[in-house]
Amino acid sequence: MSWLKTAATGKEPEPYVEPASEPKVKDASGRMVANKPANRPFLAHKEYQDKQKQLHEAWLERKKIRDEKIARGEEVGPEEKDPTAQQEIGAFGLFKFFLCLIIFAALAGKFFTGSYTWDYQGKWVQLKTYLPEGNQRLFSERLLAEFDGSKPGRPIYLAIDGDVYDVTKGKAYQPGGSYHLLTGVDAARAFATGCFKDHRTHDLRGLSEKDLDGIKHWKKFYAEHKDYFKVGRVSHPPIDPASPIPEHCDPKKAAKSKEKQSPDKQDKKAQQDRDEL
């Protein structure tokens, strides 16, 4: 509070002088300093340095005696390591550090949130994420249809763009659920258009880039879901390019799609492209 005294009296305070009776000890730099609380951390470091020095000198003496015995041809035991040498952290040390860190984080999560994973339920805490996919199977369309939830005891599968997922835990995929129409079949087109009844097919012809991006979004959704997991692939027969493209369930969108696909429209566009060139 020297500044307060200066403000009150207008005089500079006298500099602090340590009393001669104050006990002093030597610090790490060799200076004599008072043994007061503010200096004790530095003094403790000096004590540590002195102890390390003593240990090192004792080790050097033992090493000298061992070397002399070796020179005389006497049997000696294994060489003692320098107790003051700094140890490098190897791969095992790093492994133990990260393991302890994970355990600490898990226990902290259990204490604060009641969950070892801090209520995170993403794919990275699911065992299935780290299991190899070698046991996944190849489905035919007929075999995939057997897993639509109509047969008790069997899991419920759906496919999207060739990938088959187990969605048994999803209530919406159970018989009577809002998404039950998507089970037992690769309804990739329905995921893009929303026509669940009319587009239960993997035929993606005529879809826009926005529709295809929507399918990618749903594929990522199932791949990363905490309750659903991939069980294999479905093999589809080739699509006849001459077959008609499935119409949209919305009449306006269907009419617009037909207009884009009409031969006259395509010829006109091709002519415009040639004119621009």
Image (cartoon, rainbow, N blue to C red):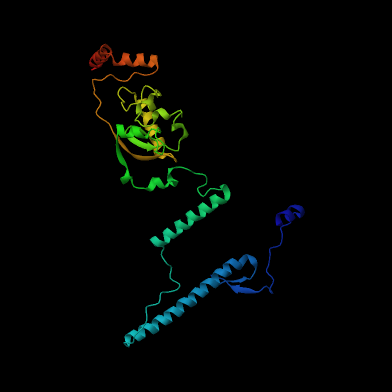
Quadrant including the C terminus: top left
Image quarter of residue 160:
top left
Can the viewer see residue 160 in this picture? Answer: no
From the viewer's perspective, is residue 250 above or below residue 133? above
Considering depth in this image, is 204 or 45 the residue closer to the camera?
Answer: 204
Can the viewer see residue 36 in this picture? Answer: yes
Residue at 38 percent of width and 83 percent of height: 66
Left or right: where does residue 223 sit relative to residue 18?
left
Image quarter of residue 208:
top left
From the viewer's perspective, is residue 70 above or below residue 262? below
Left or right: where does residue 189 sit relative to residue 84?
left
State the image coordinates of residue 2 (x, y, percent, origin top left). 71, 57
Residue at 24 percent of width and 16 percent of height: 270
Considering depth in this image, is 241 or 33 the residue closer to the camera?
Answer: 241
State the image coordinates of residue 59 (x, y, percent, origin top left). 44, 78
From the viewer's perspective, is residue 260 above or below residue 83? above
Left or right: where does residue 28 sit relative to residue 143?
right
State the image coordinates of residue 248 (x, y, percent, origin top left). 36, 19
Considering depth in this image, is 144 or 194 the residue closer to the camera?
Answer: 144
Quadrant including the N terminus: bottom right
